[in-house]
Image (cartoon, rainbow, N blue to C red):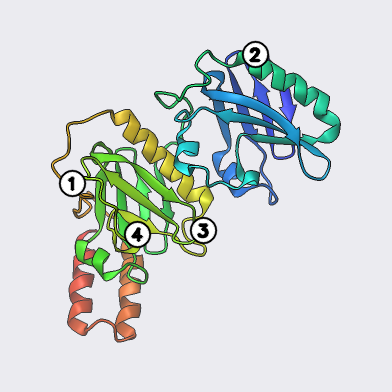
Amino acid sequence: MGDVLAGFHAVWEFDTDSVLIRFERGIRRPKLFQALGERRIPYEALRSVELSAGRRGTVVLHAVPRPGADPLMEAAAGQLKEDADPYRLVLPAERETLAEYYADELRTALGPAASSPADRHLVAAPEPPLHFKAYDGKASFDGSSVAFRWFWTGASSAKWKCGDQSFPVGELAGVEWRSPEVFNGHLRLLARGSDGRTPGEADQDPAAVVFGLGYGPVHESLPFAAAVLQAVRAAGPAPEATIRTPPVRPAVEARRDPADIADRIRQLGELHEAGLLTDDEFSAKKAELLAEL
């Protein structure tokens, strides 16, 4: 196609085999769009294209992805609010004729398998390293493993007993993302070889971090979940894991970030001053943290 269509929050640049969506930056733009920056969507990743009337004198061009084609939308599992859908382009109503033209062009470009689920991811997820702060810990992903580092002020005693966690993507079957904008929001890692039992509450599960007000926002936790999901799918099928519950093991790190260590020691000091840790407990834990430097 080789043309450009500009909307309120994004610009779509049409190529011969894909559309490049460039998201505009600004204080009134959805934070998820700003975090994504831009995304290239192959036409073969699309299921359908719709044009409809929007609110307050606008029209909406909506490209609907095939199930399984985009790890971001797969992880979101229908939980994104309409205004945060990266496949919607909102335009002034006077541009409806132009939008209809591009909608027809996109429909013509749809692949023969458009009505079928994709057997692989066709749209790239954000690239690692990625990290975000949840309510009870910090989640980080380096491309090969996911690490959870618990916060003294938020993590449950069950998680503290298990210690910080590290999960190689080869041992994972997928992710479960529940939006921080709803009750019990969390990110849970699903292990290969699980026996189908319903996991416990996320605040007690060492394979999950929980969200809260200001913790794990959509624009940070959803791209994270998508990147992990893409890595898990890329790892391919593996022999059934012998561990049938989420793996629990201390995270292995060659060298901890000194800033993280200082933050943990500061939190220890606050708990000590509040009388929640004895002198011996404070000294022992501080020594453990300093040994990781």
The first of marks 4 and 2 along the sequence is: 2
Which residue is at a point 72% across and 23% down the rendered structure image?
4
Tell me the kind of residue under disc 3.
Val
Quadrant containing the C terminus is bottom left
Q: Which image quadrant is residue 204 in?
A: bottom left
Cα separation between marks 1 and 2:
47 Å
Please name the residue that numbered disc 4 is placed on: 202
Q: Which element type, helix, strand or loop, lies under badge 1?
A: loop
Residue indicated by mark 3: 182
Is residue 257 visible in the rendered image? The answer is no
Q: Which residue is mark 1?
A: 244
The front one of 199 and 137 is 199
Give the mark nearest the N terminus, 1 or 4: 4
Dot 2 alpha-carbon crowd within 10 angstroms: few under 14, some 14 to 19, many 20 or more: few
What label sits on residue 108 in the rendered view?
Answer: 2
The amino acid type found where label 1 is placed reads Arg
- The image quarter in which residue 165 lies: bottom left
The reply to whether callout 4 and callout 2 are in contact (CB within 8 Å) is: no
- 141 above or below 48? below
Q: Is residue 12 visible?
A: yes
Disc 2 secondary structure class: helix
Which of the 4 image quarters holds residue 291? bottom left
Report the label total: 4
Q: Work out whether 180 lies above or below 213.
A: above
Which amino acid type is shown beneath numbered disc 2? Thr
